[in-house]
Image (cartoon, coloured by chain):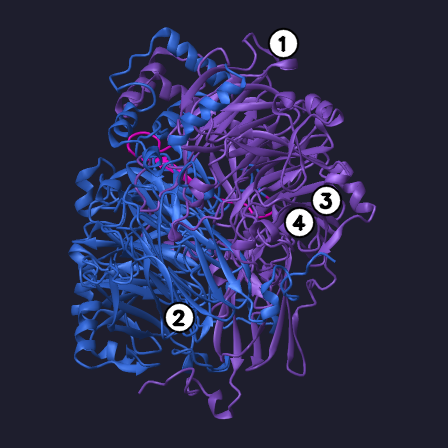
Chain colours: A blue, B purple
Amino acid sequence: MKSDASSRRTSSLLLASIATAAVLTSVAPEAGAQESRRRRGGGQEAKPVELTPEQVGQLTKVANERKLNVDDLLAAAKTFMPSGRHDEYVLFASGGQSGQMFAIGVPSMRLLRSIAVFTPESWQGYGFSGPDDHVLKSLEINGKPVLWGDTHHPALSETNGDYDGQFLFIGDKANARLGVIDLRDWETKQIVKNPLTISDHGAAFVTPNTDYVIEGGQYATVLGYGYAPLEDYKKSYRGMVTMWKFDRTKGKIDIENSFALELPPYWQDLADAGKAASDGFFFINSFNVEMATGGIEKGNPPFEAGASKRDMDYLHIIDWKKAEAAFKGGKAKKINGFPVLMLDTSVAEGILYFAPEPKSPHGVDVTPNGQYMVVAGKLDPHVTVYSIEKIKAAIAAKKYSSTDDFGVPVLDFDAVKEAQVELGLGPLHTQFDDKGYAYTSLFLDSAVARWSLGGDYAKLHSEQPWKLVQKTSVQYNIGHLCAAEGDTVSPDGRFLISMSKWSVDRFLPTGPLLPQNFQLLDITQPGTTMPVIYDLPIGVGEPHYCQMIKADKLQTWKVYPEVGWNPATQRLDPNAPKPGQEGVTREGNKVLVKMVAVRSHFTPEHVEVNEGDEVTWRITAGETAQDATHGFCIGGYNINLSLEPGEFVECKFIADKPGTYPFYCTEFCSALHLEMAGYLHIKPKSQGAAAAGQDAPVATKAE
Amino acid sequence: MKSDASSRRTSSLLLASIATAAVLTSVAPEAGAQESRRRRGGGQEAKPVELTPEQVGQLTKVANERKLNVDDLLAAAKTFMPSGRHDEYVLFASGGQSGQMFAIGVPSMRLLRSIAVFTPESWQGYGFSGPDDHVLKSLEINGKPVLWGDTHHPALSETNGDYDGQFLFIGDKANARLGVIDLRDWETKQIVKNPLTISDHGAAFVTPNTDYVIEGGQYATVLGYGYAPLEDYKKSYRGMVTMWKFDRTKGKIDIENSFALELPPYWQDLADAGKAASDGFFFINSFNVEMATGGIEKGNPPFEAGASKRDMDYLHIIDWKKAEAAFKGGKAKKINGFPVLMLDTSVAEGILYFAPEPKSPHGVDVTPNGQYMVVAGKLDPHVTVYSIEKIKAAIAAKKYSSTDDFGVPVLDFDAVKEAQVELGLGPLHTQFDDKGYAYTSLFLDSAVARWSLGGDYAKLHSEQPWKLVQKTSVQYNIGHLCAAEGDTVSPDGRFLISMSKWSVDRFLPTGPLLPQNFQLLDITQPGTTMPVIYDLPIGVGEPHYCQMIKADKLQTWKVYPEVGWNPATQRLDPNAPKPGQEGVTREGNKVLVKMVAVRSHFTPEHVEVNEGDEVTWRITAGETAQDATHGFCIGGYNINLSLEPGEFVECKFIADKPGTYPFYCTEFCSALHLEMAGYLHIKPKSQGAAAAGQDAPVATKAE
């Protein structure tokens, strides 16, 4: 240790070189060292472990200090990720009322990243480029900013019924919108508003090659945002399902080639697309076929009772290839400018059929081979299994038990039903593994039920077909569940997520508002238990549903492909300033700032404009190293941009508040990050105010 | 298994009772069962574990399948939390540009909850009660909504220099604001805008009894939001530090009794309050005493170089008790209506002194006993330790080496310096344990250094005083660090967080925008290593600093104290509708909706208003069970409320878009959650439009 004056001089000499940008770029460790550290897996190269008695002693000591039992140690070993080791799966969970998506690594259950979709998010610079921000514009409904969403059901894009890792779709129940996320850069590329209804529920679900993204409705309404009193419910209210055509090349919904189907004013719920044996169909549950209209304050039964009176609701069976043909054949009518196949057309064309289903179901889930549809009637202790073969036969033979009030044929229940399996109270949703088992969430029992499939699946296991095998308790009140690759033609088994809606006492209290509890179950070995091996509090929203994809299917960009890339268009932007082009130019009261950001400075560092100027500010992030992200903000102007390596961004604002505004890098980028700053001067209109602090409404000089 | 028609009837009978609210309230498991499950710790009552050879074999098998070594197993055992077991500490981390706070459990490193502060957050219903939302109003700056923040430094409230678990303060660097969070319900109660500067940095830090919350500036500016060209920098630009008086009874900043100090236009950085031996003082680092003004585009040195030319910057030493006396004695002048002690006053009153400090430091950190101030000069490989005793003596003896350009006495460096300790490249920030060690982050080395303190601390350890003991590599580029209770008079040791700013390859790539890496270090045993035992990706913002508090110090409310509680006022609200008072009333075009929400219905379920009505909608959450949270949203109207047990909330909007709007519960609350809904009808003004779908601009009937 030196503490004399010479040490100060030495250090200053030494550090003079550190202050140069050339050295600072080396703060990102070189790839070789990273790789060696990553593979090291915590302490040393992985080789078969044999625990010595001393090591067992160390482990036992920690276990006893922390009051862990053997099951805890096993769960810890199954989920712990050594420093730098990557998770095997990514869980894409909706964020509920947060309006966002969350990506979680499995098995470590670490929240890897949020993805902003329906709610402006400043870390990602999403919706913070000024009043004309394209995200803010895309979130307007009827000219009104609607800056949040209630994200419910994510759907990964599929090829041949298998997740392909390219796109992610997510519905906004509150406002009937659909978001499209590109999984190369994990950013939202499109928001589509449904032109028929204000709110929905059953979105998003994709057909096996992502030809269409399905958005089902929920609370019946007057299609096209119309008004009608509840007395006219049966006459004027309708359900709907919208089929959004997806253009994979453009990475966007092709609105021109999309259409909807009018449905009776039952409350449609979740959907699932057929695949393999049932390709060409999709299925939607419904509840409130009673057409109850509530009104507890008028002495009517509240919805919770009125909508639960009948024993059976209707599974909606939709032949979407026939629907597509009818739409292309010009048989749709327009509501609010959007093509809709009206009910009479769907009936006449053989597009829509119903099958009775036990009351108030939530999920309908198609088995990986497409042969069976599993309906979980939340007020019935059974799941009911339908056979596509039987459905097709019943349709062909017109085995109808009745026709509903809107002319839709109702198939005979016993003719289409394959099985019913008694599982317990409150079954909601079903997922599948690779060994012939199904897994159903039981909300009221707070449990996950494993049960055996029949038919072709019976040869994969040694159980009786269609039979409850075991249950695992979860904490508490599970809603949806999700198995690894569980919505595909080839699920993986291994891991299952219980999306437990109430956590109550499971975590430290976080105020009256508590997190949900994502619980990880090990479902590897059907012969044994399926223990809960991790509890993850979700305190950033209330996810409703998730899908889990093998991590190696994702082809994520590490940096943008070229410097000057515009993520909104996914191509190089001709407006992106290149080094040497930086500067400030003016035409009338329109000011254009061209800026480049690179460790550790912005060029230019001074920008002066006049009060009232319209400012367009373009920034290219000149970085090409992974994780060399900058930010850019102007205080008081509601502007914050995320400048990821290679990214081009633009913000616009009216310089209506004169003053001295520091701008700075908001993402810690180097040892000289704090010095990555500059000044925006907005010169007051009044001449006398040009002197410091004398513009009365803005600044008051010391009195 | 029964699959015949009788099973359907049986199930319907069985479930008829489930559909009643009385049964549904029991979905929250009773407390006894919870407690038994929680204590169970995963599988069985905790008792001393002795691993049998078979169990060792099971563990070894999992370890080998997952390529874990012994260090990994130990790390897993030290961090894994069995289902239902509570973490020991809560880490309150700023959320950087997300504008929020994040609470993380330690040692499990699970994100327990976000707390919305500067950015509207819809899950928490924060800023989503309509255009007049009180949060939105509190976020306006100069009449402009600024709906994000760059949160940097959280400060837990203290009593006698120890965290008391009552309040949490957080600064917004981008917009120079301070947020106050009440840790009973973990909600933001106040946003205060600094009247002197647009942006700041050094906030928040508290005095040992939370008399004041300290908000330091950063980029010098014209105080009072003024304009002056950079040519007038020395004349017109100033730094500042604001002392916000905190009223613990009201839980709010007392703006009337707050004041600021004018400082020279150096760029002030982080602060720390003295305690014990140094109580009554606080300390602020600075950089850019060069008063460089940048301008790379004009051929000037960029800030990164210009602000790093001199060997030494100035540690600001402020006697805040003298400052308070001067303020109370009427010696402040007003800038923009806010009292400021001008530089000449601070010099004359002996309030402000400087001490030289090695160039461009970031953190100044006071040892737990208050005797030493540790300065980490990020461009100097040493930390420099100052003694309060020596500072006081030098002030008394007027041992000045110079006076700066603004008349501030500069204390002689050697007279106030206690020690310098060479640690490595890029030291930023220092924390302390209970065994006489300090821990400093090394940004450029990507390491945490442990070093020995001297003075009274030397008796706690067996090292040479003021000496580097060891380093642990972290991944990568650590900014701040945080030890358990590390900013208090009695730190705990045990755990330390490395806030590693770059993660690069440590996690699955999440697009060009990557998470940060919070790494947990076990610092329990100074004699051995201090290994990294957990890597946590932070993909929801870029936290800058955090504080870690013992969980049992928090007195969190599990539900609101009474039904009808208004969290904004923290008392029962006389406007909260009680059961029996529900209904819709009208005065002119003003409509008042009084609603009660209880599982599983809203009362009323029907609300009809006219186009153009001004609607005030009051809702009481009638629940008293922990975690029985509801939500309330109206699609298309940007309204979402979080109705926590007992909470009263109000939203207001102009019903300017006619139509049929379902409202529903947005937080999964029971098996009949989907039925917890109703209809808002906004009747069009035009008579002819009253029929369904005929109001042309709103809905288009099928063509």
Marks 4 and 1 in Cβ contact (< 8 Å): no
Judge by depth and name the residue closer to the eye, A539 or B481. B481
Q: Which one is earlier in the sequence, the residue at label 3 or at label 1? A: 3
Label 1: chain? Answer: B
Identify the secondary structure beneath mark 1.
Answer: helix
Image-based side of B370 in relation to A205, left or right = right
**Could you say where residue B181 lies in the image, as x and y percent from the top left?**
63, 46
**Could you say where residue A385 lies in the image, as x and y percent from the top left?**
28, 54
Q: Nearer the viewer, mark 2 or mark 3?
A: 3
Q: Which one is earlier in the sequence, the residue at label 4 or at label 1? A: 1
Disc 4 marks which residue? B560
Question: Is the same chain shared between marks 4 and 1?
Answer: yes
Disc 2 marks which residue? A266
As measured in the structure, the alpha-carbon distance from the residue carrying label 3 to the one carrying label 1 is 43 Å
Label 2: chain? Answer: A
Image-based side of B667 in relation to B258, left or right = left
